[in-house]
Every structure is written in C-alpha cells, then in structure tokens.
Amino acid sequence: MGRRRQRPVRAQSVTIMLTPQVIPFTAIVVTFNEAGRLRACLDSLRVCEQIIAVDLGSSDHSVEIAREFGAEVVTHPRVPIGEFVLPKVVPHARHDWILRFDPDEIFDEQLAAEISRTICEHPAAAMIRLPHQYYFIGVPLRTTVWGGVNHINRVFHRDRVNFVPHVHNAVVAKSGYSIENADVEGHHAVQHYWVESFSQLFEKHRRYIQLEGPTRLAKGEHFTWWGLMTESGYSLYYGLFRKRGVLGGWRGFFLSFFYSWYIAMGKLSLRSTERKTDRRDKENDRA
C-alpha cells in the first residue's frame, strides 16, 4: 500500500493590530468669569488624567464649577492673555504632555487617540496642533481668516518648549524639536466659541493690540507708514478674496475689515512701543 500523499499546508496570514501607546495628559484651563462656557469645556476634558483650572480672580461661579469637575484650582493675578500663566502653572502638572485650553473651547474625545498616535509616530515632537472650528456669535465660520478648520497649537511637552511674552505665540518649540498636526475629520475638530458679542470681540482684541507692539519689536520689526498701509491693505484683500470673506455674508465682510483694522492697530502699537523705548533709552543715556 503506497504512502498517502500529504497536502501542502498553506501559510495563514496573521494581521497584528498595533494600538498606539496611551499618553496621559494634564489639561490647563485659564478662566476669568467664564462660568457660562466653563462647564462644557471641563466636561469635554474628562479624558485627561489631571485638570488644572487657573482662576484670574473670577467673581462668578467659575471656581465652584471647576471644583465640581474635580479640577485642581490655582489662583493667579490677572494677565492680558491666558498663556502668560503657563510658566508658573506648568510645574503643577503631573504629566509631561499638556493640553492648554480656553473655557470657550470644547475638546472632542476622538482627538485624544489621534494626539497619542501623533506623539508616538513623532518622538521628537514638542507641540501638536489641533484642528479648530471657530464660532462667531453662535455660527461656525466658513470664510475669512478664521473660517474653516484651522490647526492651532494646543498641546505641548513641558520640557521641549519655551514660554515667551508674545501675543498669539507664547509657547515656542525648542531647537531640535518639531511641531506636528493631529489630523482628524473636520467634525472632530475643537469647537471654539470664539466670540459671542461685538463688545467681547473688541474688548478681547484691545488687550491683544497692547501686546502687538512689544511682540513685533521683540521679533525685530520696525514701524513704517508704508508698512502699515501695505500690510493692512493686503490683509483686507486676503480676508475678502483669498479667504472668501465676500461669500460669507455680513459676517464675512465685517470680519475681513475687522482683521485689516486689527493689523493696522498692531502696527501703530509697534510705533508707540518704539517711541517709548527711544525715550527710555535717551533718559538712561542722560542719567
């Protein structure tokens, strides 16, 4: 009787799913009389293992709401923008990776896994930019420089950044480290309820304008009238046409002109800062 012929054994393919390491986060939220928005913000940040609420002297129920959500409350003197508290508050964080949020922002928990994946794929990352959707008086913006989904720095590694007193860019990656984007679908973007009234819009940006001069001077910029006209003029063109403000109804037109006005005021703030600096230098020379 002959040998039974053995059938060849087919190799079975095995798919191994690699789950990215789960990164623990500390969330820092700076608040000043933001009780109306703070609850939704803190509720969205429950995915973080630690939440630090920095109160700048609120007279509403912000502190009580923060404690209700288990946040560690730190008091700090009033500052023009929330980023200025970071050098004193970051040492309170228990984790290296920090989410820096405003009370008018709502975090999507789907972003947590994407942030962890981005960090694991880029071991030299210092900062992660999150997709943001701006809302103006309750309406998501589709046009102007604030329209659509924009990536904004909101996550950083405590040891890989420097803190500088600059408006809009107070956290800077150290040399040798990178800035990465967390890419998810637009409906998972951070919901940023940026402005709820015209008075809030101008109050907020008046504070920014005061910081524009020192920031621009520190970056080596110098004031010229030609620079004011060309930069503000191009900003208007950019907002209306490149960012389709003309298609955004009255909001598109208003915010495009507002952006141009803000740029012009920032240049004038630089001029004022330069003149104050020159006077101070002359006084020091005479002393």
Image (cartoon, rainbow, N blue to C red):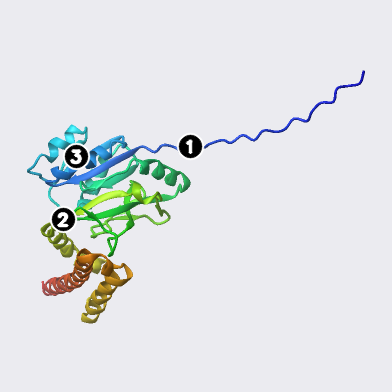
**For numbered disc 3, what is the local secondary structure?**
helix
Q: Residue at x 27, y 47 (%)?
A: 100
Regarding residue 3, the answer to whether it shows in the image is yes
Image quadrant where residue 60 sits: top left
Numbered disc in front, either 2 or 3: 3
Disc 3 + disc 1, Cβ < 8 Å: no
- Report which residue position mark 1 lands on: 19
Disc 2 + disc 1, Cβ < 8 Å: no
| Residue 178 spot, x, y in % from top left | 41, 54
Camera-side residue of 41 and 118 = 41
CA gap, disc 3 to disc 1?
A: 31 Å
What's under tag 3, amino acid-wise? Arg
Numbered disc in front, either 2 or 1: 1
Q: Residue 80 carries which label?
A: 2
First in sequence: mark 2 vs mark 1? 1
What's under tag 1, amino acid-wise? Thr
CA gap, disc 2 to disc 3?
A: 23 Å
- Report which residue position mark 3 lands on: 39
Q: Which residue is drawn at 27% across and 67% down?
A: 245
| Residue 1 spot, x, y in % from top left | 92, 18
**From what the image shows, is residue 157 above or below residue 276?**
above
Please state if 98 lies on the left or on the right of 5 as rendered.
left
**For numbered disc 2, what is the local secondary structure?**
loop
Q: Which residue is drawn at 30% across and 48% down?
A: 190
